[in-house]
Image: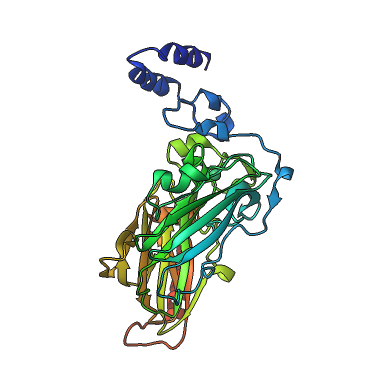
Amino acid sequence: MKTNIITSNLLNNSPSKLLILIFITIISSPSYANESSSHSYSIKEMVNFGPGDHYQHAMNINISDFKKVHDISRRATDLPKPLTRKEPKKVTIMLEAVEVISKIAPNILYHYWTFNKTVPGPFLRVLENDTVELTLFNDESSSHAHAIDLHAVTGPGGGKAVTEVEPGESKTLTFKATTPGLYVYHCAAGNPATHIANGMYGMILVEPKQGLAKVDHEFYIMQGEIYTQGRLGKAGFQKFNSRKMLDERPEYIIFNGRTGALVKEGQLNVKVGDSVRLFVGNAGVSKVSSFHIIGEIFDQVYPEAALSNPIKNIQTTLIPAGGATIVEFKADYPGNYVLVDHALARVDRGAWGILHVTGAKNDSLYSGDFEQNKDSKKRQHKSH
Ligand SMILES: [Cu+2]
């Protein structure tokens, strides 16, 4: 590693820096795949060509300095009702940047950075042409400055340029919500990727003047990634690993902040015959999501959450990193339907949830012997 430091210093003035760096990386690349060698390199040796130093975020924090949050996830049902007014007005929004300790999974703790102590942050809902006055306060206990970039904003940094706040400070952004759609917002202070990976994201819906069609249920879902020092499932407090983030290798890919957030008490409950609308965002910070519900066809999808051109009868829809989609369908048959990113190995990293449908069966739509199917599975397992 010493050679690596010396050579890196020499390289700073060399025109062929990049080529030599690639060579050095190949011959001396530390392996984080092996847990025991994860400290074989100094994180500060990592090169950075962008604004904000990602490696400065692998810090030693004192867990007791931060608030504890029992459940980091924001419920999928936790969003404002459709707006009833038709005229734009001035809307005031307060958001708090708060760093907390909470659980990725039982026994796995993480230092989350949040808007309002949940992941995702609050679902914001305004009307086309509203003037939004958004104040961001950064809690005194924060280890970093924070800021907000809303994709619904036209202007420098999407709001970041006027909202970067040190711990204990607050600042206000005023913007006009000119364009209907569903937009991601996220922290953009320092090294934005790090702030997003740590949980600072949410969505804002700018409703069109005429509103959206009435449905029986609306839900709020956001996919995110967590880059922990320990491998998937490793218990205890897990530090952020910026090297894994640079390599785009998250250990956890999750819906609504943690594993299991949309399961059991967090599941989406509807009845046969109900119309359903999902607002689904992808915080990234690296992966594109292939959003799908197993056993359901989306009647209508607003690709990339633009409200202009919905398309019909879609199986799986793409959600870019830092993008969103709106899907609508009717629940036709009772049972459990699994929400996934159809890059299906990600299910094992946490990217799944349950849509639970109750009501009468319709044999003409679907039939078979559920019980017998279970038995035959058991037999198969025995024979192995
Ligand atoms: Cu931040």
Residue 108 at x, y percent in the picture: 63, 50
Q: Is residue 128 above or below residue 245?
A: below
Q: How is the image coloured?
A: rainbow
Image height of 153 relative to 63, above or below = below
Q: Residue 310 at x, y = what percent?
A: 27, 68
Q: In the figure, 71 relative to 142: above or below?
A: below
Q: Residue at x 41, y 28 (%)?
A: 49
Where in the figure is residue 320, as x and y percent of width and height? Answer: 35, 52
Q: Quadrant of ligand 1?
A: top right
Residue 110 placement (x, y as % from top left): 62, 47
Image quadrant assignment for residue 274: bottom left
Q: Nearer the viewer, residue 26 or 96?
A: 96
Q: Is residue 32 left or right of residue 13?
A: right
Whether residue 282 is visible: no
In the image, 274 versus 316, the foreground residue is 274
- Above or below residue 53? Residue 1 is above
Count of numbered circles in the view: 0
Residue 360 at least partly seen: yes
